[in-house]
Image (cartoon, rainbow, N blue to C red):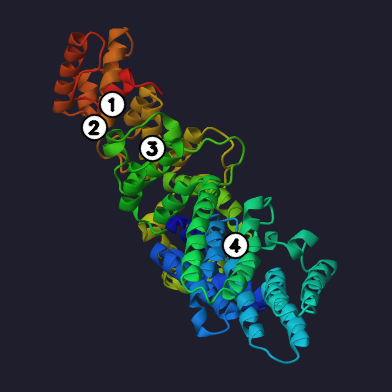
């Protein structure tokens, strides 16, 4: 019921800092202990396996705390399956990243308080009210769970005064709202406290909160049947198994509300695992988003033009994001950065830098790198200093700090130096025009930017702009950015040459021009064969050319 990549993506929604100011500010807020402990745990989610194991361990701990709270003797183990039910639903709730991980740590704090309360034998009312208030400060509205569950436990003991705990929890929430510690009364008293502030929380996330007190009541009721030893274990197990079906359904509905494949792709991008990203993209159905990540991986592997047509391509939308206005998606930032359009990349990276949980580490790294390219070292230092306080990113930040105030080191670095050579367009307007126009401005400023040239040519190839491809080849072939022509570009140039000669156009683009601009002898021979077989096929695509640009140009609709 848990997507390991969705869990791992939580690490990209926050940056846990070993910083006194950050720790104090996080701790001394409503629910601060739950929030801080949740963020501390999520910092280890850079590894999806760690994310799953930690989450399963915490869910198991919660079930054990619940069982320890309701049991009266060790012989009460048969009710343990009932204690697992709330956590099956809670794990489904955690499948949505808008539900913060602190909801799990808040539950653990509430159940820890319940566990302690269940062992108190004297002054229970005073202790109960004190625990309610302390739990609210530490865990937020999960204190209501403690209060309700404590009242249910005492109901079976015929102790009615514990209903006051619920009033105490409600009073804490009202006080937090009146003191402006929480933005709304609803967030002060409901599970929406743990949900993204700028989004309405689906009703389904209430289910775990309702199931927990019911499980406590069911455990108590089952304990009354201890004499029927065969009935209790079997019945509790059957109820647990029946509850799994709606829990799985809830998890599926939760996952359907969010782009799950993006989490998988972002994991590989964050770890710069381009082979893993390629494999993941091949395993999913073609959509522009998947193609964008696939081509991003090809670009960083230096195979964008050589391997472009080995994969299903359906136009330039699978290469660049062409959103209306000024979109703010991390995908767009990654693509613009790979293209060499650092101004646009920084524009998007800065706008996606913050989430309700904190800084996005990948976007923070991108901002730091662009500032190093610009030579604005004081700003870069601030970004790197933040990353240096995060255990997982400390080593990377310290390695990058060697570039601070060291122009020579920056210019000699393959990535940073290439970005700096694009300086003339770094301060231009970002993403106000056609993506191709902007990338051509980068190439004009820095003709040695091989990756930018590859993106420009790939865009023209996928848009079937063979005239544009030929123009770029004419201008940049033989220079550092385009020392040789990949086969796909050779095929486009040769096709355009043949086309212009057939319509009586530019005679300067004949075979000699093509040969002088990198078109190999083998490409000439294959093109002749392709033309002959196309005529013989009666308009159908000849076999053996599916990965050629001629096939894409003539037979593939975009």
In this view, the mark in front (4 or 2): 4
Give yes or no for contact between labels 2 and 1 (Cβ–Cβ under 8 Å). Answer: yes
Instruction: Give the distance between the C-alpha atoms of the residues marked 2 and 1, in whole angstroms.
Output: 9 Å
Residue 75, how many percent across, how many down? 50, 82
Closer to the chain start, of discs 3 and 1, is 3
| For marks 4 and 2 on the same chain, the one whose residue lies earlier in the sequence | 4
Residue at mark 2: 487
On residue 100, the disc is 4
Position of 90 with respect to 164 (left or right) is: left
Residue 549 marker: 1
Q: Residue at x 17, y 9 (%)?
A: 536
Neighbor class of circle 1 (other Cα within 10 Å; few <14, some 14-19, many 20+) is: many
Badge 3 element: loop
- Which mark is nearer the camera, 2 or 1? 1
The residue lying furthest to the right in this view is: 178
The 10 Å Cα crowd at callout 2, few under 14, some 14 to 19, many 20 or more, is some
Q: Is residue 261 left or right of residue 508?
A: right
Q: Earlier in the sequence, mark 2 or mark 1?
A: 2
Closer to the N terminus: mark 3 or mark 4? Answer: 4
Q: Quick one: SS at disc 4?
A: loop
Question: Percent from the top left, x then y, of residue 31?
Answer: 68, 72
């Amino acid at each position: 019921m848990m997507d390991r990549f969705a869990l791992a993506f939580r690490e990209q929604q926050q940056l846990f800092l070993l910083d006194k100011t950050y720790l104090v500010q996080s701790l001394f807020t409503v629910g601060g202990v739950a929030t801080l402990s949740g963020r501390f745990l999520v910092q280890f989610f850079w590894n999806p396996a760690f994310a799953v194991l930690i989450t399963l361990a915490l869910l198991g701990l919660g079930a054990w705390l619940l069982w320890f709270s309701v049991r009266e003797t060790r012989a009460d183990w048969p009710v343990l399956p009932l204690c697992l039910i709330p956590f099956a639903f809670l794990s489904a709730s955690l499948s949505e990243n808008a539900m913060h991980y602190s909801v799990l740590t808040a539950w653990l704090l509430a159940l820890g308080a319940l566990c302690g309360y269940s062992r108190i034998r004297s002054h229970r009312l005073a202790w109960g009210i004190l625990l309610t208030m302390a739990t609210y400060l530490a865990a937020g509205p999960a204190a209501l769970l403690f209060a309700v569950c404590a009242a249910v436990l005492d109901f079976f003991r015929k102790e009615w005064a514990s209903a006051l705990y619920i009033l105490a929890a409600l009073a804490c929430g009202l006080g937090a709202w009146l003191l402006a510690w929480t933005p709304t009364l609803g967030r002060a008293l409901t599970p929406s406290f743990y949900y993204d502030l700028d989004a309405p929380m689906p009703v389904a996330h209430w289910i775990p909160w309702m199931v927990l007190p019911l499980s406590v009541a069911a455990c108590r009721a089952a304990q009354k049947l201890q004499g029927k030893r065969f009935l209790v274990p079997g019945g509790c197990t059957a109820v647990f198994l029946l509850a799994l079906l709606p829990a799985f359904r809830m998890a599926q509905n939760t996952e359907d509300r969010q782009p799950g494949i993006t989490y998988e792709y972002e994991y590989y991008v964050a770890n710069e695992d381009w082979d893993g990203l390629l494999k993941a993209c091949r395993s999913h159905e073609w959509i522009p988003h998947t193609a964008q990540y696939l081509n991003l991986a090809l670009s960083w592997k230096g195979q964008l033009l050589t391997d472009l047509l080995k994969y299903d391509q359906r136009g330039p939308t699978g290469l660049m994001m062409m959103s209306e206005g000024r979109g703010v998606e991390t995908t767009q930032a990654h693509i613009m950065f790979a293209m060499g359009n650092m101004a646009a990349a920084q524009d998007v990276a800065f706008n996606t830098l913050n989430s309700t949980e904190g800084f996005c580490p990948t976007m923070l790294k991108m901002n730091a790198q662009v500032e190093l390219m610009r030579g604005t070292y004081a700003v870069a230092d601030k970004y790197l200093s933040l990353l240096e306080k995060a255990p997982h990113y400390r080593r990377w930040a310290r390695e990058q700090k060697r570039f601070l105030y060291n122009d020579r080191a920056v210019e000699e670095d393959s990535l940073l130096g290439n970005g700096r050579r694009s300086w003339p367009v770094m301060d231009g307007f970002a993403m106000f025009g056609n993506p191709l126009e902007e990338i051509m401005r980068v190439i004009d400023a820095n003709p040695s930017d091989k990756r930018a040239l590859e993106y420009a040519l790939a865009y023209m190839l996928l848009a079937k702009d063979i005239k544009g491809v030929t123009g770029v080849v004419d201008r940049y072939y033989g220079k550092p950015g385009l020392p040789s022509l990949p086969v796909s570009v050779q095929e486009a140039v040769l096709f355009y040459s043949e086309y212009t000669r057939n319509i009586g156009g530019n005679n300067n683009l004949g075979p000699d021009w093509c040969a002088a601009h990198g078109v190999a002898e083998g490409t000439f021979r294959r093109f002749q064969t392709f033309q002959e077989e196309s005529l013989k096929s009666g308009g159908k695509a000849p076999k053996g050319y599916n990965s050629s640009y001629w096939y894409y140009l003539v037979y593939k609709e975009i």
